[in-house]
Amino acid sequence: MSMPESSTKPYLIRALHEWCTDNGYTPHIVVTVDANTVVPRAHIHDGQITLNIGSLATNRLVLGNEYIEFQARFSGVTEHIFVPVAAVSAIYARETGAGMGFEVQESQAYPGTEPAVESNESNQVETPSPPDDDDPKRPRLTIVK
């Protein structure tokens, strides 16, 4: 009996993180925030957050197959960041925009984490609708050769 094939997404994220680092670029991920994402609420914009996952910006970075976890400082305060890989929509080099986009899938809760979005209506983050290709705020990713 064979096990289901694992997703290529976490492997591509790790590879592009390494490529950025090796070339002196700063790797950033774009995350669609859902109930299983633990990030500072003040930095969520239009249901998404962009995170610097470079070695100078993170502590205890773990790029796992299911989750990305690390500590980072936001406005001088150390925060524990928890992002399901399923919620990552892109990884790119800040300096060049080179990177890769991904489909966002439904994520699973990680035991022992507090969700970024509480169940009361005032704090709910709306799931963003797919952006238009002409949207100037949308990150432009180029193919890495």
Image: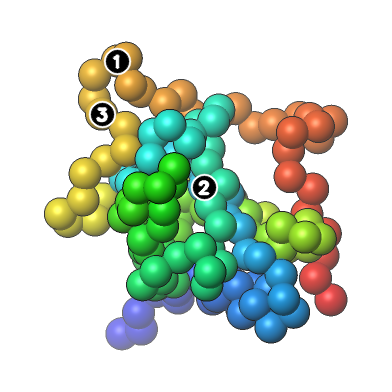
Count up the numbered dots: 3
**Measuring 36% from the left and 61% from the top, which residue is drawn there?**
71
The answer to whether one can see residue 70 in this image is yes
Q: Which of 141 and 130 is in front in this view?
A: 141
Q: Three-letter amino acid code at disc 3?
A: Glu
Question: Is the N terminus in the top left, top right, bottom left or bottom right quadrant?
Answer: bottom left
| Identity of the residue furthest to the left in this view | 112
**Could you classify mark 2 by the number of other residues whose Cα lies within 10 Å: few (under 14), some (14-19), or many (20 or more)?**
many
Q: Is residue 79 above or below residue 56?
A: above
Residue 142, by quadrant, is bottom right
Give the distance between the C-alpha atoms of the residues marked 2 and 3, in whole angstroms: 17 Å
Where is mark 1, residue-wise? 121
Q: Position of residue 42 (x, y in %)?
A: 43, 31
Q: What element carries label 2?
A: strand
**Measuring 35% from the left and 79% from the top, which residue is drawn there?**
3
Question: Mark 3 touching mark 1, by CB under 8 A?
Answer: no
Q: Is mark 3 on a helix, strand or loop?
A: loop
Q: Nearer the viewer, residue 10 or 93?
A: 93
Where is mark 2, residue-wise? 31
Q: Three-letter amino acid code at disc 2?
A: Val
Horizontally, residue 129 falls left or right of residue 60, namely right
Q: Position of residue 27 (x, y in %)?
A: 63, 64
Horizontally, residue 13 falls left or right of residue 139, namely left
Q: Where is residue 104 in the image (x, y as percent from the top left)?
A: 53, 48
Q: Where is residue 36 in the image (x, y as percent from the top left)?
A: 31, 45
Mark 2 or mark 1, which is nearer the start of the sequence? 2
Where is mark 3, residue-wise? 118
Q: Which of 83 and 1 is in front in this view?
A: 83
Q: What element carries label 1?
A: helix
**Measuring 17% from the left and 56% from the top, which residue is drawn there?**
111
